[in-house]
Image (cartoon, helix red, strand yellow):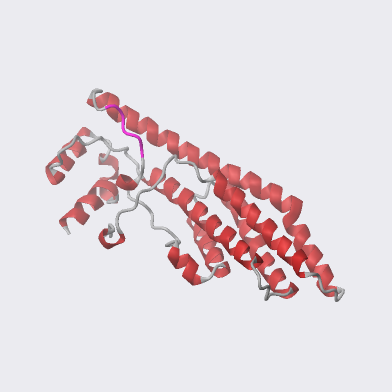
Amino acid sequence: MASRLRSWIASSDPDFGRLRGSDDFRFLQLDLDQPMRSVLRRPENVTRIRIAAYVKKLLHDGAALLERNWHQRCEPPWRADVHDLIKWLELDDRTWRLLARMAEDRAWYWLHRAQFCRLVTEAVELVHVADLRFPPPVPVFDELVIEKPDGLESLSRRDQSVEARVAELTRHVDDVVQQVGRVTATLSAATAEVGLATLRRVDAEGERPGVERLRAVCGRRAAHWQRVVDILSDDRLRVEFVDPVNIQLEP
């Protein structure tokens, strides 16, 4: 409990928000933790960088689940028909439209993130969602992979380096989310709605499209989500979660 409380005070307790950027808070951490290493001053507001890391992992893991799900739908034996595919595409298009809205505010609006989680879990079998532990928890500041400055620098220089690194990584995630939004717009305009409209027309006219044609639609959708995964797969601002047995619980 003491370890969890110290982590809560250091990274999450809102009452300490404006104090975290001060030298006095550094001394408080030294007194509480008594670590064997120096303690870097934290940014005054760690919420933005925590949410940025969460957004990046949330979108990456969700897109990876959807990409794998579309590939599995392509696998033989083919048991679906055109009606199943229309239902899958309708849900997929709703997800793409939501991604476009998320890009407008860099996924800062919590309701959009919650809706993305719901759409992914609606499309993917729960066993696969559980395997990837989706959605991920919001990381605490200590779990973010932020390059530490040179230990030989003065304390003030090192603190400034951390502040600059945090600001840089936050801007990076904002740019990446907007890039995902541009990809979303391109794919939607080029293939997404056209594919769904074509299948609806085929169904209305009573045609029975071949299995290979339906599997090709699934393959294209998997490729679209793979593009999102590729955009979000760089190593900048990664999260190293603690073991689930010892995960930080906010009191």
Q: Residue at x 49, y 67 (%)?
A: 128
Return the residue nearer the eye: 182 or 65: 65
Q: Residue at x 75, y 65 (%)?
A: 212
Return the residue nearer the eye: 56 or 65: 65
Dividing the picture into quadrants, the one containing residue 78 is bottom right
Q: Is residue 190 magenta?
A: no
Q: Residue at x 61, y 47 (%)?
A: 181
Q: Tell whether 168 sits left or right of 175.
A: left
Dividing the picture into quadrants, the one containing residue 150 is top left
Looking at the picture, how far across and down is residue 77, in whole percent? 66, 73
Q: Tell whether 14 sits left or right of 55.
A: left
Q: Residue furthest toward the front?
A: 76
Q: Is residue 161 above or below residue 116?
A: above
| Range shown magenta | 146-150
Q: Tell whether 196 sits left or right of 107.
A: right
Return the residue nearer the eye: 9 or 140: 140
Q: Residue at x 54, y 39 (%)?
A: 175
Prevailing SS of the magenta stretch: loop
Q: Tell whether 125 sits left or right of 151.
A: right
Q: Is residue 79 above or below residue 34?
A: below
Return the residue nearer the eye: 43 or 132: 132
Looking at the picture, how far across and down is residue 61, in whole percent? 49, 55
Looking at the picture, how far across and down is residue 223, in whole percent? 65, 53
User: What quarter of the picture does the C terminus occupy?
Assistant: bottom left
User: What quarter of the picture does the N terminus occupy?
Assistant: bottom left
